[in-house]
Image (cartoon, grey):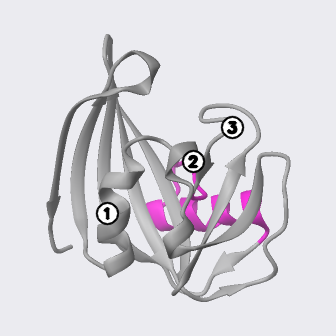
Amino acid sequence: MEKLLTLTIIHQHPRVLLGMKKRGFGAGRWNGFGGKVIVGETIEDAAQRELQEEAGISAEALEKIGVLDFTFQGNPEILRVHVFRADAFLGEPTESEEMRPQWFHVDEIPFAEMWPDDVHWMPLFLRGQQFKGRFLFGESDVILEQELSPVSF
């Protein structure tokens, strides 16, 4: 079984916009903005909707930069995350019930407070290199297996 998800990160070099997840899956971690794709919605539409709901902004253009498959040991569900980047947006990043946006310098990204896979693919993201990957998590979100490779979409 596969669940489609989106993740969007605003990258205006030398800074990135991340959000502190305040509730639900991933609470207490910095992450990009995103979530589930609703039936009948395109992946890009879902990415824009989630960005608007979680940060109060809309990307002027989304660039698909990655696809990551996440699985958790003992759970057959695959979380397929389509990763987007944007450099221009409309609106002002605003805290929502779910996320608290904050800018970070690329040299100060808080990897210790993020999902442990982020440190592996974020350097590709920051270089503008498209990628695909797969991560298997065990207990306490330890990465048991990983694959990551550059691709072109």
Q: Does residue 81 appear left or right of residue 34 in this picture? A: left
Residue 125: x and y in percent read 36, 70
Mark 1 or mark 2: whose residue is earlier in sequence: 2
Residue 12: x and y in percent read 56, 86
- The residue carrying pointer 2 sits among few (fewer than 14), some (14 to 19) or many (20 or more) residues within 10 Å by Cα, namely many
Mark 1 or mark 3: whose residue is earlier in sequence: 3
- Viewport quadrant of the C terminus: bottom left
In the rendered image, which residue does mark 2 sit on? 35
Task: Tell me the amino acid under the disc marked 3.
Answer: Gly
Residue 84: x and y in percent read 44, 68
Could you say which quadrant of the image residue 48 lies in? bottom right
Task: Give the distance between the C-alpha atoms of the residues marked 1 and 2, in whole angstroms.
Answer: 15 Å
Task: Tell me the amino acid under the disc marked 1.
Answer: Gly
Label placed on residue 66: 1
- Viewport quadrant of the N terminus: top left
Task: Give the distance between the C-alpha atoms of the residues marked 1 and 3, in whole angstroms.
Answer: 24 Å
Q: Does residue 98 appear left or right of residue 106 in this picture? A: right
Residue nearest the viewer, comparing 124 with 104: 104
Residue at left offset 41%, top offset 41%: 116
Residue at left offset 52%, top offset 49%: 37
Instruction: Based on the picture, tell me whether residue 44 belongs to the magenta stretch.
Output: yes
Could you say which quadrant of the image residue 151 lies in? bottom left
Q: Does residue 2 appear left or right of residue 150 in this picture? A: right
Up/down of 83 relative to 129, above or below: above
In the rendered image, which residue does mark 3 sit on? 28
Mark 2 or mark 3: whose residue is earlier in sequence: 3
Residue at left offset 47%, top offset 47%: 5
Question: Answer yes or no: do the residues labelled 1 and 3 have beta carbons within 8 Å?
Answer: no
Q: Secondary structure at mark 1?
A: strand
- In magenta, the rendered stretch is 32-56
